[in-house]
Image (tube, rainbow, N blue to C red):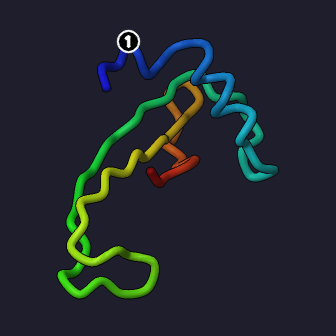
Amino acid sequence: MPDEECNNADNIEWMNNLRTDDNKEAFTQCIAFESSFRSPKKGGGAWEANEEYTWSWWLARSEGGEWNLMTWGY
């Protein structure tokens, strides 16, 4: 996802709504990554056998701060 699409007011508000007591400063930046992977051929646990999954990973930070992993999944 391009930075311009990800780092917009709606997504920053969403990241701030996900904050916990550990995140005292309001977030001013966010970024998203996507990863694709294939599950084991025989499946297992929550995985369907031999399926491709695409997950999104959302991180946020205050200006110049450390990135915090806020949410992930598909």
Please provide percent x and percent y for residue 63: 54, 24
Which quadrant of the figure has residue 42?
Answer: bottom left
Q: Nearer the viewer, residue 22 or 17?
A: 17
Tell me: residue 7, above or below residue 59: above
Please provide percent x and percent y for residue 64: 49, 28
| Quadrant that contains the N terminus | top left
| Residue, far right | 21
Q: Nearer the viewer, residue 69 or 47?
A: 47
Q: Is residue 19 left or right of residue 38?
A: right
Q: Give the residue pinned by disc 1.
A: 4
Residue at image coords 18%, 82%: 41
Tell me: residue 12, above or below residue 9: below
Q: Nearer the viewer, residue 2 or 54?
A: 54
Q: Badge 1: how crowded within 10 Å, few (<14), some, or many (20+)?
A: few
Which quadrant of the figure has residue 60?
Answer: top right
Q: Is residue 46 left or right of residue 62?
A: left
Residue at image coords 57%, 23%: 11
Please provide percent x and percent y for residue 16: 70, 32
Please provide percent x and percent y for residue 2: 30, 20
Secondary-structure class at tag 1: helix
Tell me: residue 62, above or below residue 54: above
Which quadrant of the figure has residue 24?
Answer: top right
Count up the numbered dots: 1
Residue at image coords 71%, 41%: 18
Tell me the amino acid under the disc marked 1: Glu
Q: Nearer the viewer, residue 58 or 23?
A: 58
